[in-house]
Image (tube, rainbow, N blue to C red):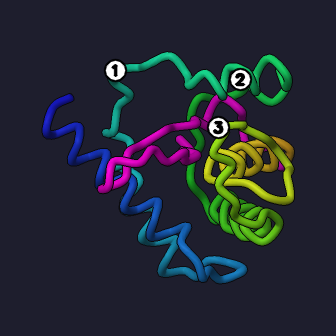
Amino acid sequence: MTKAFLKKTAFALSVFALLFSAPLQARPNSDAIAQLKSLQSQLIQLKERNKNRPPLAYQVFCRKHARECRGGGSSSVRYNKKLIATLYETNRAVNRKIRYRNDRGETWSINTPFGDCEDYALTKRSELIRKGVPASSLRMAVVKTRSGIGHAVLVVR
C-alpha cells in the first residue's frame, strides 16, 4: 500500500469514528451535514486497493445467510439530509440494541443481543438495506487499530 492510500484511509476512518462515536444526537444538526458534504469529495478519492478474500468467518456467515450478502442497486449513494439522518438513526438504534461482548470464536452474526464489531456492522448493513440504502453501496471492511487488532466497520460509499 502506498503512503497516500494509507493517509486517505486513516482520514476516512477518522471521519467515520468522529461521526459514529457515542454519544450521538438523534438527528444530525446542520453543521454536521455541512461537514459531511465538504468531506464527501475528499472521501470519494479513497479507492479500494489490494482487495483480499473476505475473512473465513464472513464467508461462513454468507453461506448461512445468503440474502444478507447479496449486492444490488447503485454502488454509491449521494449524501443528503435524509440519508445522513438514516445513517445516524440506524447507528444509534443498533448500538443500543446490541450489548458488546467479544465472541473470540470469530462468529459473525446478525441481530444478536450480544456481539462485537462485525456483529454491529452486519446488523447495521441489514437495517440500512431494509431502509432502502442500496446493498452495493455498503462495504464491510476490516481495518487494523493502532495496536494492530482487526476491527470490522461498515463503509457507505
Name which of mark 3 and mark 2 comes first in the sequence. 2
Badges 3 and 2: C-beta atoms under 8 Å apart?
Answer: no
Picture coordinates of residue 38, whole percent (x, y): 37, 62
At horizontal 44% and vertical 70% (from top left) the residue drawn is: 18
Residue position marked by numbered label 3 in the rendering: 106
Q: Secondary structure at mark 2?
A: loop
Question: Mark 1 is on which residue type?
Answer: Asn
Residue 148: mark: none
Question: Mark 3 is on which residue type?
Answer: Glu
Name which of mark 3 and mark 1 comes first in the sequence. 1
Query: Taking 155 as reference, is 66 left or right?
Result: right
Give the alpha-carbon distance from disc 3 to disc 1, as whole Å. 23 Å
Task: Answer whether residue 38 is magenta in the image.
Answer: no
**Which image quadrant for residue 136?**
top right
Name which of mark 2 and mark 1 comes first in the sequence. 1
Residue position marked by numbered label 2 in the rendering: 71
Residue position marked by numbered label 1 in the rendering: 50
Residue 6, compared with residue 28, is above or below; it is: above
Q: Secondary structure at mark 3?
A: loop
At horizontal 62% and vertical 80% (from top left) the residue drawn is: 24
Give the alpha-carbon distance from disc 2 to disc 1, as whole Å. 20 Å
Q: Nearer the viewer, residue 61 or 42?
A: 61
Residue density around tag 3, few if under 14, some if 14–19, many if 20 or more, within 10 Å: some
Q: Range of the magenta residues?
A: 131-157
Picture coordinates of residue 61, whole percent (x, y): 76, 27
Question: Mark 2 is on which residue type?
Answer: Gly
Residue density around tag 1, few if under 14, some if 14–19, many if 20 or more, within 10 Å: few
At horizontal 15% and vertical 31% (from top left) the residue drawn is: 2
Residue density around tag 2, few if under 14, some if 14–19, many if 20 or more, within 10 Å: some
Query: Taking 85 as reference, is 10 left or right?
Result: left
